[in-house]
Image (spheres, grey):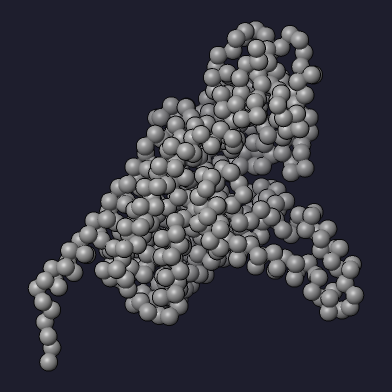
Amino acid sequence: MITKPYPFTKFMKKTVERLTTGLMIALVIWGVGLRLYRFGAIPTDLNRDETALAYNAWSIAQFGIDEWGRRYPLMFESFGDYKLPGYIYTLALSFGLTGDNDAAVRWPSLLAGIGLIGLSYGWGRKLTQKPPVGWLAAALVAVSPWAIFYSRTAFEAHLALFWLVLTLYLTLDQVKPGRLLAMTVTYFLAILSYNSPLLLLPVVVLFVASLPHKSWREKGIISLPLVLVALVTTWGFWPLINQKQNITIFTDPTIWSQINQNYSQAENAWQRLGATKYTAWTGLMLKHWSQSLGYKFLVVRGGAHPWHSIPGYGHMFWTTWFWFWLGAGLIYLKKIPDWRAGCSLIILAMGALLPALITVDAPHATRSLLFLWGLLMIGAISLPKLKGWALIPLVTLTLESLLFGYHYFKIFPQEAVKTYPSGIATLATKLTSPEKPVAITNASRLSHDLMSEQIYIWFLWYDRIAPEIYLQQQRLVGRDAAGMIRVQQFGRYSVYNDPNQVPDDNQVIERTADNIYHWKI
């Protein structure tokens, strides 16, 4: 005999469903608010890469040349790290609308972050045909620490992530000429913005090949324009690609030295087989893969780079980390109707680690943004299985996001001055004696090399020194071990690591131990 549910049971079920949906929508709104509140004021200062993007974009907008005097280049040499043109030209165009101030430098990344929330909703809904999954996907992205942090800072990788996720979203649609053209354009824009999307071409093609409900003919038609775009851009940007090989495990001199030492110490053929460069590289990639999936990197403290997360936080919350493993487990056990789509997401997320796996400073958040986003999508796909129980982790997620908001806006600004130079904007625009030369020195930490930090770029930006003047009065002192330029003189400014070398007739700007710049009295 079939029994009907009691009216109260149906009422409670409906109430829980409404509360769950309402809380997910509230988290989306809260996440957008976390991106907009005091935008441009926190972080309080631009970091080195943000400032380089700002100055080159301003120079392009004002004079049509970059800081090296090259007219509308497709590759920006910058410090010697060779930046792609996507963010810089986007910024140059937007300066006319937003003005050329610090907050404006971060606007493209902010818009990319808000757009990524909307794309995540579309992804979840289209992949599973279930709107609640879309809302959970959007909510997880909206409040994740990495997504908030990168939305409030000018990162080329973050703009590239938006274009790449949009490209992948378009691959889910029916094969039509308009969609193929849009997908080709967005993938090209992703490649122009950062290096990872080009390297991830095999992963993108594998993702397309794994999509359910598409014929092999459709998959081939989708993949072909992506491959062609990648081949063309590889040819066009080969000097930049070749330069980026210096940061991989395949070329790092320290790793090569260890490989040679291990091989020379091998006593027999089996030991030599285990000490080859191929086994060493494989071991390093497995180590990086394990570290990237570990809770220490994802939840507890993030990576080693101070510009990729706030102190005391990883890149996701414990709740979202739990949600990812739950989703991955349900997909593996085929316990959800959309497990085939989930397999495609796992292929995408794990493959997206490729750029971080082969570089020396892994785990690395900026090179793993698609991976971090993919983990959230894997977690969102588990929602139908949780049913009414989803309300519990949503409540804990809300509490975690509230605590993160307090930490970001109340504690982080006090800690940021340790890694973000402070005070330069005021100093550069209010010189005490404009006719006198200015010396920049480092009184409290003589061993710290201001030239290797490229301190010149902040003064170029805040003093708005025209590139022609900068180049006429520039004095370089070579490059450091990583190939980054070291500028000692630019315009009226000179850099001295030793304050005893400063000429007597110079105005002096000192950096304190707290990374704050001020006039020496």
Dividing the picture into quadrants, the one containing residue 216 is bottom left
Percent across and percent down for residue 134 are 32, 61
Kindly identify the residue that appears in the image at 70 percent across and 52 percent down: 247
* Left or right relative to 396: residue 305: right
Percent across and percent down for residue 12 are 16, 68
Percent across and percent down for residue 92 are 49, 33
Percent across and percent down for residue 26 are 27, 51
Q: Above or below — where is 163 with respect to 291?
A: above
Residue 113 vs residue 237, the one in the foreground: 113
Q: Above or below — where is 375 with respect to 519?
A: below
Dividing the picture into quadrants, the one containing residue 493 is top right
* Left or right relative to 315: residue 465: right
Residue 198 vs residue 366, the one in the foreground: 366
Dividing the picture into quadrants, the one containing residue 461 is top right
* Left or right relative to 365: residue 34: left
Q: Above or below — where is 235 with respect to 422?
A: below
- Residue 56 at least partly seen: no
Position of the C terminus by quadrant: top right
